[in-house]
Image (tube, rainbow, N blue to C red):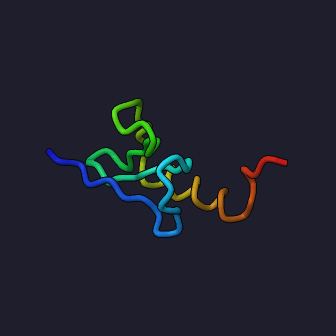
Amino acid sequence: MKINWRKSSRSGAINDEACVEVAGVISGVAIRDSRDPDGGRLTVSGDQFGHLLQQIKVGALDRT
């Protein structure tokens, strides 16, 4: 099965810019580092991914 990875349209075009890519998979959502596409991947359920996005949007995960 081919996985179709997507990167945010807000990501810059610079190759060395840190970014993540996501893909819908049978078990939920897969997440990987766009600079290391052959490296490790994290897979979470759709609900877990939604919670992660919520936390990001409200700034709960921002570094200070």
Quadrant assignment, res 30: top left
Question: From the viewer's perspective, is 16 left or right of 32?
Answer: right
Residue furthest right as drawn: 64
Look at the image and tell me whether residue 44 can be seen. no
Quadrant assignment, res 42: top left
Q: Residue at x 24, y 49 (%)?
A: 3
Residue furthest bottom as drawn: 9
Question: From the viewer's perspective, is 47 left or right of 6?
Answer: right
Look at the image and tell me whether residue 53 can be seen. yes
Residue 47, image x, y percentages: 48, 54
Residue furthest top as drawn: 40
Residue 54, image x, y percentages: 62, 61
Q: Residue at x 75, y 52 (%)?
A: 62
Question: From the viewer's perspective, is 56 left or right of 6?
Answer: right
Nearest the viewer among 50 and 21 is 21
Image mark count:
0
> Which quarter of the rendered picture does the N terminus lie within?
top left
Q: Residue at x 36, y 49 (%)?
A: 28
Nearest the viewer among 24 and 40 is 40
Residue furthest left as drawn: 1
Residue 29, image x, y percentages: 38, 50
Rendered view: 20 above or below 8: above
Residue 31, image x, y percentages: 43, 45
Q: Residue at x 56, y 47 (%)?
A: 18
Question: From the viewer's perspective, is 24 left or right of 48?
Answer: left
Quadrant assignment, res 4: bottom left
